[in-house]
């Protein structure tokens, strides 16, 4: 009898949150396997992000910080948490939302409605920039020309430059340095933060290894990039699992049976976000890396953090020749070639040769793109030797 009572007490204790030991657990953290209550989850989730911000010195008081907002779960949670931490810990930041309208009917137009609601819900000013205004093209137009195979290359390259520019006008449909300086000065942008999480970064490490892209591999795990440019980009969610933002298994009892539920931080906080995937992304190369990462996580949850750690510890041999960082002769954007990737892609689109900026067979590096001339590997590197993915850290 006594043994039975002791066993019952032990089982009851095991059903309490392992942190506060007072409330019943509602979820199991994927990277620590701790069973914790909702209140403790809020506390540790937000405190871990705060510690990442503080330890890496991501912000300084008085800085004007743009939050890359797509309306999805990552950027929505980022906007909410950063607003809370800014208030709670007196960061002294001037926060606002920055959204990119790629011109994808049935996807981006709907997600932007979510962002507009977030603007009112969080009290953060919203700035929307479009591919159409900046480049003269929408992704719908580009897909009609290029098809679904390489469309993510265009979208990723254009989005990065829009984020870097943060302006609303262009000269001859091309991003230009003057516009960047004018926009940054007008809006007083100091930093841009994005919702890239640990899963995203682990995928990028793997993709750069598969592509043999040493230059990107050397910087893809950096929590802050673009420090040599006008607007540094930060990733406060670098060590935050996607499941901690999106899917949390938590255990509860119902009529003495264990039931598995799926919930999210956004769900617990009742945040308003858009959950549909881009209609043009099913064939993206990154998707294959994502599936592989998910399989690894199922076998060993810490695999994601281990891949990031491996990426951080990679060292490039001193004998390895690295691309020299310069500026694009046409627009002034950062580039290791005479023309940046965006200018190459735009030139191809405007000439009716959309594949000119894709792959290895293109015109010479002097900006002469009148002919799509194939050159042997020994003849030197072309304008852009590697395809870009949809994300580049």
Image (cartoon, rainbow, N blue to C red):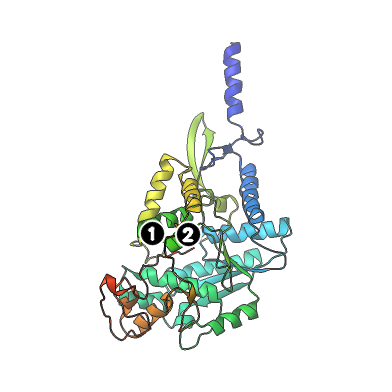
The part of the image, by quadrant, that contains residue 67 is bottom right
Residue 218: assigned label: 2
Q: Is residue 335 above or below residue 330?
A: above
Q: Where does the image place residue 362, in percent across and percent down from the top left? A: 31, 77
Q: Position of residue 128 (x, y in %)?
A: 55, 75
Q: Earlier in the sequence, mark 2 or mark 1?
A: 2
Q: Residue at the spot x=60%, y=26% of the render?
A: 12
What residue sits 54% from the left and 36% below the top? 252
Q: Give the residue at the far front of this rendering.
A: 319
The residue closer to the viewer here, 58 or 254, is 58
Q: Is residue 179 above or below residue 257?
A: below
Residue at the limit of the structure toward the bottom, as seen here: 172
Q: The N terminus appears in which quarter of the rendering?
A: top right
The label on residue 286 is 1
Vertical comparison of 255 with 107: above or below? above
Looking at the rendering, which quadrant does residue 357 occupy? bottom left
In the rendered structure, the answer to whether residue 225 lies left or right of residue 369 reads: right
SS class of the residue under badge 2?
A: loop
Callout 1 crowding tier (Cα within 10 Å): few <14, some 14–19, many ≥20: some
Is any part of residue 221 visible from this angle?
A: yes
Q: What is the tally of numbered marks visible in this picture? A: 2
Compare residues 117 and 155 and report the one nearer the observer.
155
Viewer-proximal residue, 223 or 242? 223
């Amino acid at each position: 009898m006594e043994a039975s009572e002791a066993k019952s007490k032990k089982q009851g204790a095991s059903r309490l949150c392992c942190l506060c030991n007072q409330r019943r657990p509602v979820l199991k953290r994927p990277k620590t396997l701790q069973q914790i209550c909702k209140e403790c989850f809020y506390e540790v989730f937000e405190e871990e992000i705060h510690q990442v911000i503080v330890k890496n010195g991501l912000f300084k008081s008085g800085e004007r910080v743009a939050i890359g907002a797509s309306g999805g779960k990552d950027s929505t949670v980022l906007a909410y948490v950063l607003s809370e931490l800014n208030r709670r810990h007196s960061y002294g930041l001037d926060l606002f939302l920055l959204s990119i309208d790629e011109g994808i009917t049935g996807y981006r137009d709907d997600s932007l409605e979510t962002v507009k609601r977030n603007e009112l819900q969080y009290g953060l000013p919203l700035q929307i920039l479009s591919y159409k205004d900046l480049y003269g093209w929408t992704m719908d137009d580009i897909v009609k020309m290029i098809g679904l195979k390489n469309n993510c290359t265009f979208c990723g390259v254009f989005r990065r430059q829009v984020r870097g520019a943060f302006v609303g006008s262009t000269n001859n449909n091309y991003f230009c340095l003057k516009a960047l300086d004018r926009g940054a000065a007008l809006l007083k942008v100091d930093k841009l933060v994005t919702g890239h999480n640990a899963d995203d970064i682990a995928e990028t490490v793997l993709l750069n290894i598969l592509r043999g892209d040493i230059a990107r591999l050397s910087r893809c795990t950096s929590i802050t990039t673009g420090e040599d440019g006008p607007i540094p980009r930060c990733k406060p969610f670098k060590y935050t699992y996607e499941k901690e933002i999106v899917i949390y298994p938590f255990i509860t009892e119902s009529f003495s049976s264990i039931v598995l539920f799926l919930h999210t931080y956004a769900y617990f906080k009742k945040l308003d976000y858009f959950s549909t995937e881009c209609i043009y992304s099913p064939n993206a190369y990154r998707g294959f890396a994502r599936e592989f990462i998910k399989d690894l996580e199922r076998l060993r949850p810490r695999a994601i953090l281990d891949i990031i750690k491996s990426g951080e510890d990679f060292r490039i041999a001193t004998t390895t020749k690295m691309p020299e960082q310069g500026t694009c002769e046409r627009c002034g954007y950062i580039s290791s070639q005479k023309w940046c990737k965006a200018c190459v892609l735009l030139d191809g689109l405007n000439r009716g040769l959309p594949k000119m900026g894709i792959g290895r067979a293109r015109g010479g590096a002097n900006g002469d793109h009148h002919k799509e001339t194939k050159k042997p590997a020994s003849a030197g590197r072309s304008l852009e030797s590697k395809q870009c993915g949809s994300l580049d850290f």
